[in-house]
Amino acid sequence: MALVISGIPIEIYKKNIKNMHLYVKPPDGKVMVSAPLSMKDEAIERFVRTKISWIKKQKDKFDTQLRQSKREYVSGETLYVWGRQYYLRTEYGNKNSIELLGEKAILTVRRESTAEQRDNFIREWYRDQLKSETTRLLPKWEKATGLKCSSFQTKYMITRWGTCNAAKRKIWLNLQLAKKTPECLEYVILHELIHLIEKHHNERFISLMDNYMPMWREIRSTLNGQTLDFIE
């Protein structure tokens, strides 16, 4: 089910839950509502209309947030790696590579390569970065919580920093996390591990987050406040 209120598209999902939950999701301010299966559509719409002012304020934060321009991967652009900003210097050769040197990211590509091909290479480089760091950090949080996932994967996501399949005990992490400060990755890892035993963002979930990472709210705010990717 979908609504459009004051020009804002709102996705509605009915689930086996007791209470209604409203989300304005990073990084682009997508609005979603989770509602009990028994709740009538009219009641859901009335609830959303009472929250429209709050929704607009949250969306404005995303709209005015610093966002990267469209990438061409040429000298002078910026590249973010683990929260640090690097200035791109593009060189040409027969083999794609990237090297972080001081404040510079030296990108070597074929001269005839397209922006899309360069983007694909950078994306896979970020994937390697994220996999390496997750392999290091995941055991730390599995040990701290006693929760273990069967495996993790990385993928590029627009509306979520992470997700999990509790039945298969598998988690996915957004490739964009390799651009954010390291504690943001730790926050998302812990968040998804807890979802293995608590799928809702209820009092139990919040209590577990508070127990294992008391500063998680501040880290979440930092994550959502950092520079976003370019979106068409």
Image: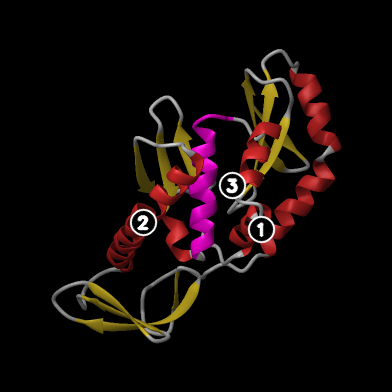
Labels 3, 2: front one: 3
Mark 1 and mark 3 lie on one chain; the one further toward the N terminus is 3
**For the point 54% across and 52% down, which residue is it?**
187
Q: Earlier in the sequence, mark 2 or mark 1?
A: 2
Instruction: Classify mark 1: helix, strand or loop.
Output: helix
Q: Which residues are magenta?
A: 182-199
198 on left or right of 153: right
Vertical side of 110 occupied by 26: above or below: above
Q: Which mark is residue 212?
A: 3
Q: Residues within 10 Å of mark 1 (few under 14, many from 20)?
A: few
Q: Is residue 198 magenta?
A: yes
For this rendering, which residue is in front, 65 or 166? Answer: 166
Residue 212, x across and y down, in percent: 59, 47
Q: Are marks 2 and 1 in contact (CB under 8 Å)?
A: no
Disc number placed over residue 136 in the picture, else none: 2
Amino acid type of the residue that numbered disc 3 sits on in the rendered structure: Tyr
In three-dimensional space, the C-alpha distance between marks 2 and 1, rounded to whole angstroms, equals 24 Å
Q: Quadrant of residue 65?
A: bottom right
